[in-house]
Structures are given as C-alpha cells and as structure tokens.
Image: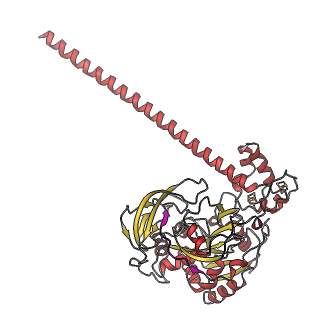
Amino acid sequence: MRLFRIKGGVHPAERKDATREKAVEDAPLAARLVLPLQQHIGAPAKPLVKPGDRVLKGQPIAAPAGPVSAAIHASTSGTVESVGPQPVPHPSGLPAPAIVLIPDGRDAWCEPMLSLGPYAAPEAIAERVAEAGIVGLGGATFPSAVKLNLRARHRLDTLVMNGAECEPFLTCDDRLMREHTSELIQGVALMARALGVSRAVIAIERNKPEATAAMTGAAAAYREIAIAPVPTRYPMGSEKHLVQALTGRETPAKALTADIGVVVHNIATAFAVYEAVILGRPLVSRILTVSGGAIARPTNLRVPLGTPIRHLIDVCGGLTETPQELLSGGPMMGQPLRSTEIPTVKGMNGVLALLPSDTRRGPAHACLRCGTCVAACPCGLLPFEIAAHVRNGDFAAALEAGLMDCIGCGSCAFACPSRIPLVQSFHHAKGHVAAEARRKQRADEAKRLAQAKAEREARLAAERKAEMARKKAAADKARAEAGAE
Ligand code: SF4
Ligand code: SF4
C-alpha cells in the first residue's frame, strides 16, 4: 500500500522489550473495585444501583446520560458498597462520583445479551456497542457508538484501525493482535459494516512484525480489510496523521477526519465490539501494559475495570524502588497518577512506574531558539513561540499562535535540547483557557438569569399596578353608583 509522508515526529527509545513477549495474563480480582461514572468523553453516566444492591458481572450499573455518554457495567459479581466521590484518574486530582463494588469471589455473569451474528444490521451493531458501554480504548474514550453512527452525517469511504501503538513501553495492542487475531478481524468487519464503508485499513507500526504477519493471515479471507505496516515514528498513532499517512488526505484544523471521509478507531476497540456483538458481553475489562524500570515483573494484564493501580503493581511483583513518575498511558502523552488507589478505567492502556533512567526529564535551560521543536512538531506549529506567550501569561497570543491545534503529543519537549517542558506548559495553558471559557459561560448565564429575573419582576409589578388600578376604578364606580341612589 502506498504511504504518504507526514510532518515532524521523533524516535524515542522504544523500551518495549520488557513486555513484548509476555502473553496477556488475567489479573486476579481485587478486594474492592471503584467504577467512576465518567470513564468517557461526555456526560457522566447515571447510577442505576444503590448501596447494598447485589449485582452480577456484566449487569448495567450506570446508564448513559445523553447522546454523548456511556453505560457502565459491573466488572464482577458482588455488592455495591457506596455511590459517591472516589479518587479517579483526572488531571485535576479531584475526586469524582464512582460506584464502589465489593466482589463476592464468584465472578458470576448475568444472562448475556443475544449474539447478533456477523451479518447484523448497521444500526443494530451501533446500538449494541452503545448498550455495551464501549468507548475508544486507545485513550481517547469517545463513545464508540457515536462514531459508528457517523455515516448518517458524513459521506464515509474508509475505516482506519489504529494498531500503531507508537508510545514507548506499551505492548498491549501488539499482544492483542498476536493473541486475538481472529476476534479482532471479525470486530473490524463489524465496524466497517456499521459505518457502511467498503474499505478498512489496519495500520501497524513496522516494529511489530509478528502482529503484522498474524493480522495479514487472518484478514486474507476479508476482501474489504487491508493491513498497512507504517513507519515506526512517534506520533504515528495520532488520528489525523495516521489518516494522512494512509490516504494522503489532510484533515483541516478544527475539522474531524469524518469530514474527509475517514473514521478512525483503536484496534482494541474492535475486540470489545466483537465481544459485544458476537458474544453478547459488555465492556467489563481491558488489556493494558504494566511496565517501567521500577516494576519488578513487567507484563500485559487483562484487568477488570475498577481495579486499583496498587493491585496491578502487586500482581507484577511490586516496585523495586520508588518511581520518579507513575503514569497512566505512555511516557509521551500519559497522565500522572497521583495515587495507587486510582482505579483502572476504560481508556487506560498502560501503567508505568518510571525511574530517572527511563525518562529524559531533567533541569530545564534557556531556549536556544534552535528550532528543533519546530522540526519535531507534526502539526506545523512553532512550539517555542507558543511557550514564550504562555510564559508571559499572554494566552490570547498563544491561541493566535495555534495553541488549540496542538495535539499534546510531546514531540517538541522530547526533542528540545534545553529540556524545556513545552507540552506541560501547553497543557497548563489549555486548562487555563478552558477554565476562562467556563467562567465566562457562567458569568454570561448569571447575567442572563439576572436580566430575566428583573424583566419578570417588572412585568409582575406592572400587572399588580394594573390590577390595583382596575380594583380602584371598580370601587370608585361602585361608590359613585351608591351615591346616585
Ligand atoms: S527546541 Fe527547545 S531550545 Fe530549541 S527552539 Fe525549541 S524550545 Fe527553544
Ligand atoms: S505537543 Fe503540540 S506543539 Fe509540541 S510537537 Fe506536539 S503538537 Fe506540536
């Protein structure tokens, strides 16, 4: 297949050897599971259970709250302990509502949903994916059913399955492609059917030859599915860049890939779709990589959702020393985990306990204006310039310079010889801009409500005045008539 060049990118050390050959193990059940109501982009789910309720594995315990939201299911059988704030993986570090489940150890499934079979109608596939609570498992966590319904609003021709797994350390998608090849191909065929496209391309970085060979063999029976080995270059897994590399089409700023006819899903999502549509099982677990220099026995685990990170580290033999960083996801785009009590959620593809030797972090120096960050940026931005605006607190200028076009890939920070934490400063600036937008929205809403209240009070006062005048006129008339008699 012909590939097209993409801008920028970097070659961080892969560091995948510790887990690449480790077959996926089932993590044993933890004593307590915490299932946040928001494990997806969109509105938090609404709880369907209360403390004391007994639930079975796969039973819905929270329903989607709106068109962009996702259901949550019990990841094992047991009793609901509480519904309320718990530590969750969120950059703010603040607790958020969650359902706490105490497993009964039986791991007993509820009645599965009916299998829809491989020839299900497109609408039925999307409906089942919604029912199963499936979200983008590569970390984006956008509800998958919404994306599978995009054919209603866009003219689509291609489904791209992202099996690039370009982040260092992570090997869970590699293992999934090697161990569940047939299920994945069936899942991809179902997703292509749901989207109404006749072409599905599974992109796999060239550093995964075994996965590429396995998937190529399994896809041979499907005319519409092609396997595309893509260069090992970070961030090849970025949605817009992958589409450009495979199709040559550039997604305009602020547009979706669907606007140019392409929908992208992570390869792990195809496995969840297979389980939901063919086996009738909702999303109750996921496969992730536990690795980093501080993990005694790095491996890939299939983990019930809600399992605390502490339990995963214990299953992997514990920590050999105190990590410099504990991350959810890869070292380039992962988010810091502030506590090992934080639970495993749908979008978590890795837990990394990194030592100083695993990272390039160190004291930052002054900008040399060398332009290395510009060459590394896959979005064609001038990272040093945006960073200078952020440093000066000039967020308007940072926005003007393309802050919101930054995909947060971290290539610039990785390449910077002065180790300037560029991407961290962009995250901070985006948080500031979002908080300002929310503050302005609240202020506008308060102003609108105050204005509506003042108008209502003026109207009521006018009505009262008119009523009093009417009563006075009636009384005057009655008195005049009585005087006349
Ligand atoms: S790579 Fe670093 S030192 Fe060079 S211009 Fe960019 S921010 Fe400055
Ligand atoms: S983090 Fe943003 S600015 Fe830096 S390389 Fe990636 S897209 Fe460009």
Q: Quadrant of residue 372?
A: bottom right
Indicate the position of residue 64 as horizontal and vertical percent values: 45, 62
- The C terminus lies in which quarter of the figure? top left
Q: Quadrant of residue 249?
A: bottom right
- Residue in the foreground of this view, choosing between 413 and 212: 413
Indicate the position of residue 219 as horizontal and vertical percent values: 63, 86
Residue at horizontal 74 percent and vertical 72 percent from the top: 245
Indicate the position of residue 265 as horizontal and vertical percent values: 61, 71
- The N terminus lies in which quarter of the figure? bottom right
Q: Residue furthest front?
A: 321
Q: Residue furthest top?
A: 483
Residue 307 part of the magenta-drawn span: no
Residue 196 showing in the rendered view = no
Q: Residue furthest left?
A: 485
Magenta: main secondary structure: loop
Indicate the position of residue 177 as horizontal and vertical percent values: 63, 82
**202 to 432, vertically: above or below:** below
Residue at horizontal 51 percent and vertical 36 percent from the top: 447
Residue at horizontal 44 percent and vertical 70 percent from the top: 74
Relative horizontal placement of residue 462, taking residue 38 as reference (left or right): left
Residue at horizontal 78 percent and vertical 56 percent from the top: 381
- Residue in the foreground of this view, choosing between 379 and 369: 369
Residue 29 part of the magenta-drawn span: yes
Residue 224 showing in the rendered view = yes
* Ligand 1 image position (quadrant): bottom right
- Residue in the foreground of this view, choosing between 305 and 212: 305
Q: How is the image coloured?
A: secondary structure
Relative horizontal placement of residue 155, taking residue 463 as reference (left or right): right
**19 to 241, vertically: above or below:** below
**331 to 480, vertically: above or below:** below
Q: What is the span of residues highlighted in magenta in the rendered image?
A: 24-40
